[in-house]
Image (cartoon, rainbow, N blue to C red):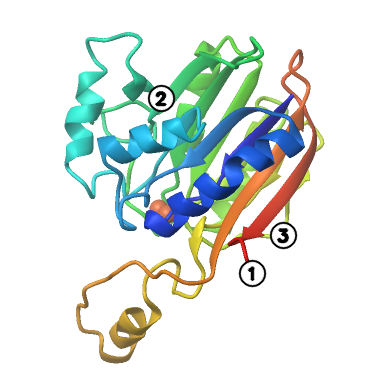
């Protein structure tokens, strides 16, 4: 079976290119499961319940996030709404699993694909150059001990390439894929590790590349030049969809191939 994972969807430009391109990618690659990181889906900062609904309607099955998850406060009530409802759609939106105990939301989703294959999605966040949260490595051990599905996809949301590569090796042979997010820059190191785990350090942003990682470049330059705080606004031009297609064996959960994708706006 094939899994599609779309990198950090950034603002309206990112959502628009997903709307334009997702159907074709799913059909071309015969994708059975679509996962996307949506931590920047609302104007570049966070995500809101209506945007979650919009992304689900486009055909995304599970949304992961990262450090920007709390930027829009409405998401807190949305996460809490899933507590009493076992089949709530809100359960298909994750925040990193290694956030402190008591944090709204969860970091693991277990479901079944359209083709009837059980799967799990795990969202983790790194600690190098990021908030000091729980150890994602040891928590991954605990999570994996409880999962029944063979198909396990891990979004490792982290800043440092070393921490992401380390997680890839740590989980090799135990999960279907470890794919990194957060830096918004795709890396050319996709491969299947010896144990059968598909790996890519960062899948890259789905959003405007005429920018500094999604934000209007003039604003970021001003901050680097003066050190003064600046208001950040999402950029709009040179929109690209960055994703990875993972070909895996549904029976064993091991990957056979991994393919990096970068698509430009239609008409370019
Ligand atoms: Fe991001
Ligand atoms: Fe992030």
Inspect this view and state whether residue 169 appears: no
Residue 252 rendering spot, x and y as whole percentages: 76, 16
Give the residue furthest to the front. 267
Q: Mark 2 = which residue?
A: 92
Badge 3 residue CB within 8 Å of ligand 1: no
Please identify the quarter of the rendering in which residue 3 is found.
Answer: top right
Give the residue furthest to the bottom. 225
Give me the disc on residue 268. 1
Q: Quadrant of ligand 1?
A: bottom left
- Dot 2 crowding, Cα within 10 Å, few <14, some 14–19, many 20+: many
Q: Residue at x 41, y 44 (%)?
A: 38
Of the numbered discs 1 and 3, the one sitting upstream in the chain is 3
CB contact under 8 Å: marks 2 and 1? no
Q: Residue at x 64, y 32 (%)?
A: 171
**Position of 123 relative to 181 (above/below):** above
Q: CA distance from mark 2 to mark 3?
A: 29 Å
Of the numbered discs 2 and 1, the one sitting upstream in the chain is 2
Residue 29 rendering spot, x and y as whole percentages: 75, 36
Q: Mark 3 = which residue?
A: 188
- Element assignment for label 1: loop
Inspect this view and state whether residue 107 appears: yes
Give me the disc on residue 213. none
Of the numbered discs 2 and 3, the one sitting upstream in the chain is 2
Drawn side of residue 262 relative to residue 88, left or right = right
**Position of 9 relative to 247 (above/below):** below
- Element assignment for label 3: loop
């Amino acid at each position: 079976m094939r899994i599609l994972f779309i990198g950090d969807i950034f603002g309206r430009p990112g959502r628009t290119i997903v709307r334009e391109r997702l159907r074709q990618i799913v059909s071309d690659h015969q994708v059975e499961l679509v996962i996307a990181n949506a931590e920047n889906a609302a104007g570049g900062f966070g995500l809101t319940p209506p945007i979650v609904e919009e992304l689900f309607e486009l055909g995304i099955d599970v949304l992961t996030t990262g450090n920007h998850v709390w930027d829009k406060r409405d998401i807190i009530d949305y996460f809490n709404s899933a507590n009493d409802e076992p089949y709530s759609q809100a359960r298909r939106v994750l925040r990193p699993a290694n956030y402190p105990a008591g944090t709204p939301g969860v970091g693991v989703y277990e479901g079944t694909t359209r083709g009837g294959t059980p799967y799990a999605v795990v969202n983790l966040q790194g600690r190098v150059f990021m908030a000091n949260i729980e150890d994602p490595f040891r928590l991954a051990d605990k999570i994996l001990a409880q999962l029944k599905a063979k198909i396990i996809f891990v979004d490792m949301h982290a800043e440092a390439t070393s921490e992401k590569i380390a997680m890839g090796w740590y989980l090799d042979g135990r999960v279907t894929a470890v794919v990194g997010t957060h830096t918004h820059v795709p890396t050319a190191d996709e491969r299947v590790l010896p144990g059968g785990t598909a790996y890519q350090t960062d899948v890259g942003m789905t959003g405007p590349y005429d920018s500094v990682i999604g934000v209007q470049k003039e604003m970021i330059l001003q901050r680097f030049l003066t050190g003064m705080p600046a208001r950040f606004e999402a950029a709009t031009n040179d929109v690209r969809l960055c994703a990875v297609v993972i070909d895996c064996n549904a029976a064993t959960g091991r990957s056979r191939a991994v393919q990096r994708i970068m698509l430009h706006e239609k008409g370019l």
